[in-house]
Amino acid sequence: MFDRLTPAARQVVAASADEAALRGDRRIGTDHLLLGLLHDPATAALVGVDVDTARARLQDLDRAALEAIGITGADHVAAVPISRGSAQPTSGFRAILPLAYTLAATERSRRVDPRHLLLAILTRDVPDPAATLLASLQVPAATVRARASQA
C-alpha cells in the first residue's frame, strides 16, 4: 500500500499514525493525515497553517461535536494514547492513497510525495474530517490546490 511513497511521504504517514495515537484514536483518518502533512515544513507553508494550530482546532471540533450530543467538559474522558502500530486506516484515509498515486502518475512521476497526498486531501468534501478541519481553519482549498500544483 505504501510502496511508492517517497521517504518524505512515508514520514507523513508515520506522523499521521503518531497523531492518531496521541489523540487516543484507534483509526487513522484523513484528519490525522492532514496533521501528518503539517509536520512537513513545505506542506505547512503551502497550507498556511502550523500543526499546533490545526491540532488545537481539531480539539475544538471534537469538543463541539461532544457538546452537540450532550457531553460537556468533565463529562468526557481525555484521550488515552494508544500505540502507533495498533491504529488502522479509515476508508477515507485508504481512498487518499490511490488518488495520490493517480495524481503522481499524471505528472509522470512513479513516486508519491507529500504534495500529492495534500492534493488528494483537497479533493475531499465536508463532512470528511480533513475537509471539515480545513474549512474550520478557513483554508481556501482552491488556493492551496493552485499553489501545490505549481510547486
Image: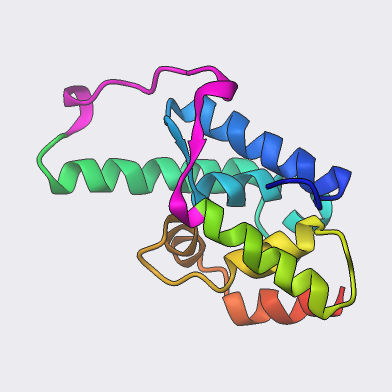
Q: Can residue 47 be seen in the rendering of this structure?
A: no
Q: Quadrant of residue 142?
A: bottom right
Say if 107 sits above or below 67 in the image: below
Q: Visible in this render: residue 97? A: yes
Q: Which residue lies at the image location 69% right of the left edge and 34% below the top edge?
A: 14
- Quadrant (top left, top right, bottom left, bottom right) of the C terminus: bottom right
Colouring mode (rainbow / by chain / secondary structure / one colour): rainbow
Residue under the point 68% across and 74% down: 144
* Nearest to the observer: residue 38 or residue 49: 38
| Apparent side of residue 105 relative to residue 109 in the rendered image (left or right) | left
- Residues 9 and 4: in front is 4
Q: Is residue 23 above or below residue 54?
A: above
- The answer to whether 50 appears left or right of 6 in the picture is left
The stretch in magenta equals 72-92
- Vertical arrangement, residue 137 with respect to residue 22, above or below: below
Q: Nearer the viewer, residue 107 or 78?
A: 107
Residue positioned 58% across, 22% down in the render: 85
Please say whether residue 85 is one of the residues in the magenta stretch.
yes
> Which residue is at a point 77% across and 56% down the rendered structure image?
114
- The image position of residue 122, as x and y in percent, is 59, 70
In screen coordinates, is 126 left or right of 36? left
State how many labels appear.
Answer: 0
Q: Nearer the viewer, residue 98 or 92?
A: 98
Tell me where residue 101 appears, x and y as whole percent.
73, 65
In the image, residue 126 lies at what x, y percent?
A: 39, 68
Q: Is residue 124 above or below residue 14?
A: below
Residue 103 lies in the magenta-colored region: no
Side (left or right) of 142 relative to 45: left
Q: Position of residue 134 (x, y in %)?
A: 51, 63
